[in-house]
Image (cartoon, coloured by chain):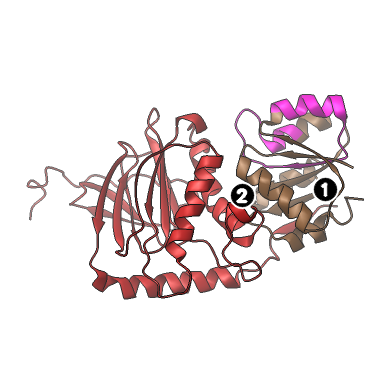
Chain colours: A brown, B red
């Protein structure tokens, strides 16, 4: 599977990668982006199977990204991994077609439980 | 003491940003400003001319501001002890509970500043705390310092000032608008009370469980 991780924080991208490994998701092709705008261009070019994205980012937020994808009719499994997760945000994520939302600081167990159905 | 001696009349309490209503704020004649006091595990961000204050034992506080916009804030945290791997460091891989929690504390502060328009590349960073005041086998304070420095390095933030380590607790007043810091090393006498507050915080961190951290849609 091609998994794309989008987070403006280098530390967070490292943590997500490591947590995926600890949760047992190995042997996948990972790509990382620190900017959702750049990621959007890459998604159109490479069509990843799963996107794990932060919410709050400069230039373009995670929710703007998934809304942009929906507008262009691009259907890719999309999950948020985010620091902030208000009821409003959860609702907006679901409405935009996100599959799940993982709030930081998450555990490897919550990754396993959430992603088990999405990562083959 | 009258207000005149301090040169500052008590001003109207500035509005508080959404999400920080729980933080206690008081008028400080010494600071000549409204002052928000943060406790272990809390953080505070402001775009007003006010002060953020805290007392640190082995905990660490990272102060950040955007000098151009005069917005800034401070957090106050420690790394939870990871019973599976011990207190982890970036050197042991960034997946441990400790680094996840610490990064979360850092990102929360950075996110709120960015919401106020602060630019990552302009953020000016100061670092305080990490004393060795708890009588435990591991030097919790040193681990907190290591984590903060490694996180900031990884995210390419330069630390422009710091006062860390040692054995005495610290009282920190941070003025986000100007970047000014007033730091006082406290008597060792105050250490037990601060240590016990930090122990309670540390226990709470150990008990925090997952459960609310995942939501599946549809």
* Neighbourhood count class around disc 2 (C-alpha, 10 Å): few under 14, some 14–19, many 20 upward: some
Residue B20 in the figure: left or right of residue B6? right
In the picture shown, does residue A81 fall above or below B142? Answer: above
Residue labelled with disc 1: A99
Picture coordinates of residue B146 (x, y %)?
48, 53
Q: Chain of mark 1?
A: A
Element carrying mark 1: loop
Q: Is residue A52 magenta?
A: yes
Q: Chain of mark 2?
A: A
B100 or A102, which lies in front? B100
Residue B153 in the figure: left or right of residue A35? left
Picture coordinates of residue A88 (x, y %)?
66, 48
Q: Residue at x 76, y 63 (%)?
A: A109
Q: Earlier in the sequence, mark 1 or mark 2?
A: 2
The span picked out in magenta is A37-65
Picture coordinates of residue B165 (x, y %)?
36, 58
The numbered mark at residue A84 is: 2
Q: Quadrant of residue A74?
A: top right
Q: Is residue B216 magenta?
A: no
Residue B25 in the figure: left or right of residue B145? left
The answer as to whether the residues below labels 1 and 2 share one chain is: yes
């Amino acid at each position: 599977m091609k998994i794309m991780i989008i987070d403006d924080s280098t530390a967070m991208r490292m943590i997500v990668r490591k947590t995926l490994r600890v949760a047992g998701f190995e042997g996948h092709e990972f790509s990382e982006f620190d900017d959702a705008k750049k990621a959007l261009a890459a998604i159109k070019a490479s069509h990843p199977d799963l996107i794990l994205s932060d919410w709050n980012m400069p230039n373009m937020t995670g929710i703007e990204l998934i809304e942009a994808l929906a507008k262009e009719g691009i259907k890719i499994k999309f999950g948020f991994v985010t620091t902030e997760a208000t009821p409003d945000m959860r609702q907006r994520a679901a409405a935009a077609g996100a599959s799940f939302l993982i709030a930081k600081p998450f555990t490897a167990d919550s990754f396993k439980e959430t992603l088990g159905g999405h990562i083959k | 003491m009258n207000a005149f001696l301090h040169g500052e009349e008590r001003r109207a309490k500035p509005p508080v940003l959404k999400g920080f209503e729980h933080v206690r704020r008081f008028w400080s004649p010494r600071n000549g400003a409204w002052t928000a006091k943060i406790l272990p595990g809390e953080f505070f961000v402001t775009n007003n001319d006010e002060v953020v204050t805290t007392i640190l034992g082995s905990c660490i506080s990272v102060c950040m501001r955007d000098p151009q916009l005069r917005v800034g804030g401070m957090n106050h945290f420690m790394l939870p002890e990871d019973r599976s791997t011990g207190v982890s460091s970036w050197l042991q891989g960034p997946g441990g509970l400790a680094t996840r929690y610490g990064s979360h504390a850092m990102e929360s502060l950075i996110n709120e500043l960015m919401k106020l328009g602060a630019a990552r590349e302009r953020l000016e960073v100061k670092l305080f705390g990490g004393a060795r005041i708890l009588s435990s086998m591991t030097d919790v304070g040193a681990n907190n310092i290591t984590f903060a420095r490694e996180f900031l390095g990884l995210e390419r933030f330069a630390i422009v000032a710091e006062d860390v380590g040692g054995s005495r607790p610290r009282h920190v007043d941070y003025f986000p608008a100007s970047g000014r810091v007033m730091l006082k090393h406290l008597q060792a006498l105050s250490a037990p009370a601060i240590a016990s507050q930090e122990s309670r915080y540390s226990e709470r961190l150990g008990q925090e469980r997952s459960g609310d951290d995942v939501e599946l849609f549809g």
